[in-house]
Amino acid sequence: MLEPEYLQTLFNVNESYVDLTSFWLSKAKYLNVLHLGRWQGSSKNHIEVTNTEFLRTLGDLKHLRYINLQGISRIHELPLLISSLRHLKILDLRACHNLEKLPSGISMLENLEYLDMSECYLIGNMPVGLAALTKLQVLKGFVIGNPTANGHCKLSQLTKLSNLRKLSLNIYESMADYIAEYELEHLRSFNQLRSLTVAWLGIPPPSKSRKATTRQLRPSLTYSRANTMSQLPPMLEKLDLRCYPYYELPRGLQGMEALKKLYVRGGQLRSLMMTGENGNWATSISILRLKFLIDLELTWPDLCSLFPALVYFEKVNCPKLCLCPCDGRGVWRQNPTASLSQAP
């Protein structure tokens, strides 16, 4: 095995149990890439670490630019010393289901461009240091919290991140409608944002005395019927709504000329029309994906009239969406000869 002093990349190919000693890792002074998590993109690829002591060594690896811990269990928190990694550009923590918080010194990661906390359902507090990461381009798993809570980064504080292009937000069922609406109003100030995902989750992050499993998380179906998000980022090209708890789409979609992709996955959406809207709001959308919308009622001719620029459509478990000329996978393409590799 190559001596750690000469390592620049460490990649976990297929090990389900990672055993790294702090002493061995501390000698890899010139390590640039540390990929210990899964890369297959499936939750079936479970990874555990024998112990988390090696995490304390990360602060000594000053040349690290990439850290991937995706899908690794038993990691409850990241050490404060990780904030000394001034060259770090990518930090992937997706599906670290035991992770409860981020280090308070995360603001010191001045070159961070990509931070993924999606599927980290125990993280309930966003450190205020996130607002200082001015080079951040992708931020996934940001939790909408109470704007009056101390020590919690607010959505409004992220508006000064001028390089942010992709953002995903989590809203928990315990969050009152008026608080969620107040926070989401700030979306209009994200002038450079191109992709936005918003997920409404059913169970809030538990306290340490009440551990939760991902099985406890469910779509929230108890919101009032008046939807939020009256204004959206002006340059938005993709909007992904998950467990959407309202009957109608956000009014902020009106006039969104840059929007090309719209996904709605689960929830209580009943109509793609907007009350009081005379014109056709969806003229620019070319890609539409609708999944698990049992209350959505529409015919294919009406859908085509509403989305005249449509080139790709996908539906899954939408029983009241009728007469759609989709294939066996629920997919329709304007060009049926397009290969699978050309699917959006």
Image (spheres, rainbow, N blue to C red):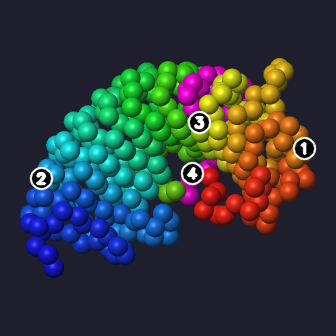
Pointer 2 or 4: first along the chain: 2
Q: Which marked residue is nearer to the observer: mark 1 or mark 2?
A: 1
**Residue at label 4?**
217
Residue 60: mark: 2
The span picked out in magenta is: 215-236
Pointer 4 or 3: first along the chain: 4
Does the magenta portion include 123?
no
Q: Residues within 10 Å of mark 2 (few under 14, many from 20)?
A: some
The residue at 82%/23% (across/down) is 279
Q: Amino acid at mark 1?
A: Pro
Residue 301: mark: 1
Secondary-structure class at tag 4: loop
Q: Amino acid at mark 4?
A: Leu
| Location of residue 44 in the rendering, given as x and y in whole percent from the top left corner | 50, 70
| Location of residue 130 in the rendering, given as x and y in whole percent from the top left corner | 33, 33
Does the magenta portion include 216?
yes
Pointer 3 or 2: first along the chain: 2
Q: Amino acid at mark 2?
A: Asp
| Most foreground residue, 99 or 270 | 270
Q: CA distance from mark 2 to mark 4?
A: 37 Å
The overriding secondary structure of the stretch rendered in magenta is loop
Q: Is residue 197 visible?
A: yes
The residue at 50%/65% (across/down) is 42
Q: CA distance from mark 3 to mark 2?
A: 40 Å
Q: Amino acid at mark 3?
A: Glu
Q: Is residue 174 visible?
A: no
The residue at 62%/31% (across/down) is 258
- Taking 190 as reference, is 54 left or right? left
Pointer 1 or 2: first along the chain: 2
**Residue at label 3?**
237
- Taking 84 as reference, is 284 left or right? right
Q: Residues within 10 Å of mark 3 (few under 14, many from 20)?
A: some
